[in-house]
Amino acid sequence: MSSRISLTRYLVEKQRVDGHIPGQLRLLLEVVARACKRISFEVNKGDLGHVMGSAGSQNVQGEVQKKLDIIANEVLIEANEWGGHLAAMASEEMEGIYVVPNRYPQGEYLLLFDPLDGSSNIDVNVSIGTIFSVLKMPDDASGVSEKDFLQSGRHQVAAGYCVYGPQTTLVLTVGDGVHVFTLDREQGSFVLTQENLRIPEDTKEFAINMSNMRHWDSPVRRYIGECLAGKEGPRGKDFNMRWIASMVADVHRILMRGGVFMYPWDKREPNKPGKLRLMYEANPMSWLVEQAGGAATNGRQRILEVQPTQLHERVSVILGSRNEVERVTQYHLEAG
Ligand code: AHM
Ligand code: MG
């Protein structure tokens, strides 16, 4: 007999023994995990499944959609719409919210997702993933509308991602630490493989797209400049750099061994607060990172406290090892 704990058992025990999550939330998370498993199988097929390449369309943000972006979005919607635990969904790939059709029962939760993060890595066989966040409908809501989604990240009741890499790994928080489940393809289920991840407070590794350096604001230039100066510079140590260009994979590395991840505001698009999306990317990742003892800010403010004013809002992101995030944030505050 195996003593391994499946995601199903973990969630049942969270509900029954700890009383930490309601039954409806447990069901919802099971369905999201099942959808991620499906997406993982589609991703694995690669060219054999005719899932690669562009779909010839654009999403609401004007980005070219890949076939897998659309497949992953459909898998998540089809898996979640009939279960009775959701009122509506919102996705990076859809302009408006998707209200659960009235042929199905309506639940009290809202699900938000980036169905396939790191799209530029699909065609080159590099890790990509799904990011998700769960909110509750506001108590005073009558019917569901877009404004019900506009809650700050600290209202999340569950958040996680699934990374499709050498292994398929689901990383989850329901507010009591961060736990890792690895897909056992022979059993067809996610199995608990790491509990209570902790991000070291200090690090010697940063993740940023260096090609944008000339567009950054001075606090980010100052921070990265000091890292690059190495042992001889003010930090007195050498730094290493990694940039996968899939947020799921970069954040996963940081959860595993520390580091600081940045996608800051830059001068190319002065009126946009950043590239990454607050509701589908920054909020779930920031909560996971905080739950693992790290920190996440937009340079001035905790990301989880940013009040969204629109569904597809963007934000500047600095997250990871606490002392480094505090340093970058301090540089922003000093710059006024
Ligand atoms: P996507 O959701 O359209 O894939 O875009 C988000 C991705 C992040 O995963 C990653 O951190 C970033 O975009 C990479 O951007 P760049 O190609 O500018 O380095
Ligand atoms: Mg994304």
Image (cartoon, rainbow, N blue to C red):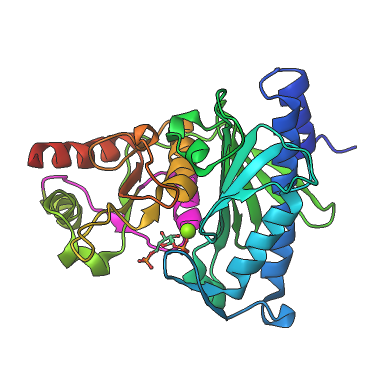
Q: Which sits in the foreground, 321 or 114?
A: 114
Q: Which sits in the foreground, 170 or 298?
A: 298
Q: Residue at x 65, y 58 (%)?
A: 167
* Residue farthest to the front, as pictured: 142
Residue 327 appears in which quarter of the rendering?
top left
Q: Which sits in the foreground, 100 or 74?
A: 100
In the displayed structure, would residue 289 be above or below residue 177?
Answer: below
Q: Position of residue 156 (x, y in %)?
A: 52, 33
Picture quarter with the N terminus = top right
Q: Position of residue 176 (x, y in %)?
A: 57, 25
Q: Is residue 179 visible?
A: no
Residue 67 appears in which quarter of the rendering?
bottom right
Q: Is residue 44 visible?
A: yes
Q: Position of residue 238 (x, y in %)?
A: 23, 53
Q: Residue at x 70, y 17 (%)?
A: 18
Does 80 sit left or right of 95 as displayed?
right
* Residue farthest to the left, as pictured: 335
Q: Residue at x 72, y 74 (%)?
A: 45
